[in-house]
Image (cartoon, rainbow, N blue to C red):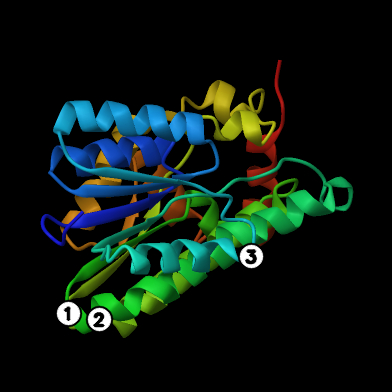
């Protein structure tokens, strides 16, 4: 993998939004470095993308929630002289349940993956982008970033961090040739709801989640046009805007109602 064409690193790339983003980058002739936990799924995705686009695809089956993994990935790419032009921090997960009863490893795992790994990867790859005066970072947050949600307190808090971090970083690098983007999808038809035990929630059963393909297109377009904040879908944009003006207790109560399970 040489330095041309550009190379995009995408975490959480074996399914959902990450997979759809990988297809968009491959379509535009980017070389790809794909990271996810499942080697089998990654290999399937890599074979598919190579067949469709003919571009180089390198995979790493890694659990980014483990503390040393981000540095291991960075060091391996350094050894192979693979420069990353676009970093997409997409990997993340949530868990539904009362905070006091959610297993500790689930709580800490969300913080390590959604916050620590995202921050560490950005810190590792950003300096080289700044030195080249060229590059892009997409941090995938969520419309969860705009409101608290009981029974998903940690997940929503991690996404609020991603939004705050990304907007501050975008200001820091303005004029450098590097762009930082925060992408905020709403409810999306992926494996997220199954992993979070939310398949029967009002959010996913009644409110019609968007397709991962449509969401990825919104995020990709926003990244390529230099937008700092991208909220996918008009309904999601309206919800994100409305919570700015509503009383906090009302926002939290409605957020809890949306997450409740229905028949």
Q: Is residue 241 shown above or below 197? A: below
> Which residue sits at x=15%, y=34%?
54
Q: Name which residue lies at 33% across and 54% down.
A: 9
Q: What residue is pinned by disc 3?
A: 67
> Quick check: marks 3 and 2 in contact, CB under 8 Å?
no
Q: Residue 263: percent from the left, percent from the top? A: 71, 15
Which residue matches tag 2?
Answer: 130
- The label nearer to you, 3 versus 2, is 3
Q: Quadrant of residue 198?
A: top right
Residue under pointer 1: 133
How packed mark 2 is, by other alpha carbons closer than 10 Å (few <14, some 14-19, many 20 or more), is some
Question: What SS does tag 3 mark?
Answer: loop
The mark lying in front, picked from 3 and 1, is 3
**Mark 3 vs mark 1, CA separation in Å:** 29 Å
Nearest the camera: 25 or 4?
Answer: 4
Residue 223 place in picture, x, y as percent: 24, 56
* N-terminal-most mark, 3 or 2: 3
Note whether 31 is above or below 161 in the view shown: above
Numbered disc 2: secondary structure: helix
Distance between the Cα atoms at labels 1 and 2?
5 Å
Is residue 15 something one can see in this rendering?
Answer: no
Whether residue 49 is visible to the viewer of this picture, yes or no, is: yes
Q: Tell me if 236 is positioned left or right of 69 in this view.
A: left
In this rendering, position of residue 160 left or right of residue 262: left
Left or right, residue 194 beside residue 241: right
Which one is nearer the viewer's eye here, 241 or 107? 107
Secondary structure, mark 1, is loop
| Residue 203 position in % (x across, y down) | 58, 31
Mark 3 / mark 1, whichever is N-terminal: 3
Please, which residue is most extreme toward the top here? 263
Residue 177 x/y as whole percent: 16, 77
């Amino acid at each position: 993998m040489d330095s041309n064409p550009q190379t995009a690193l995408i975490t959480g790339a074996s399914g959902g939004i990450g997979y759809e983003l990988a297809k968009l980058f491959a379509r535009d002739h980017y070389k790809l470095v794909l990271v996810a936990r499942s080697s089998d799924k990654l290999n399937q995705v890599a074979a598919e993308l190579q067949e469709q686009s003919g571009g180089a695809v390198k995979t790493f089956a890694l659990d980014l929630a483990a503390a040393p993994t981000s540095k291991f990935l960075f060091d391996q790419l350094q050894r192979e002289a693979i420069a990353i032009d676009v970093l997409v921090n997409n990997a993340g997960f949530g868990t539904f349940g009362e905070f006091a009863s959610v297993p500790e490893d689930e709580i800490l795992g969300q913080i390590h993956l959604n916050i620590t790994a995202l921050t560490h990867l950005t810190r590792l790859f950003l300096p080289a982008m700044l030195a080249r005066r060229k590059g892009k970072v997409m941090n995938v947050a969520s419309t969860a970033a705009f409101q608290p949600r009981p029974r998903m307190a940690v997940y929503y808090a991690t996404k609020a961090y991603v939004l705050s971090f990304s907007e501050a970083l975008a200001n820091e690098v303005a004029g450098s040739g590097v762009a930082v983007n925060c992408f905020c999808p709403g409810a999306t038809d992926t494996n997220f709801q199954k992993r979070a035990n939310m398949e029967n929630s009002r959010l996913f059963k009644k409110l019609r989640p968007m397709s991962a393909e449509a969401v990825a297109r919104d995020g990709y377009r926003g990244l390529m046009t230099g937008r700092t904040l991208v909220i996918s879908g008009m309904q999601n944009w309206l919800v994100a805007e409305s919570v700015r003006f509503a009383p906090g207790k009302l926002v939290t109560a409605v957020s809890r109602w949306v997450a409740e399970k229905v028949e």
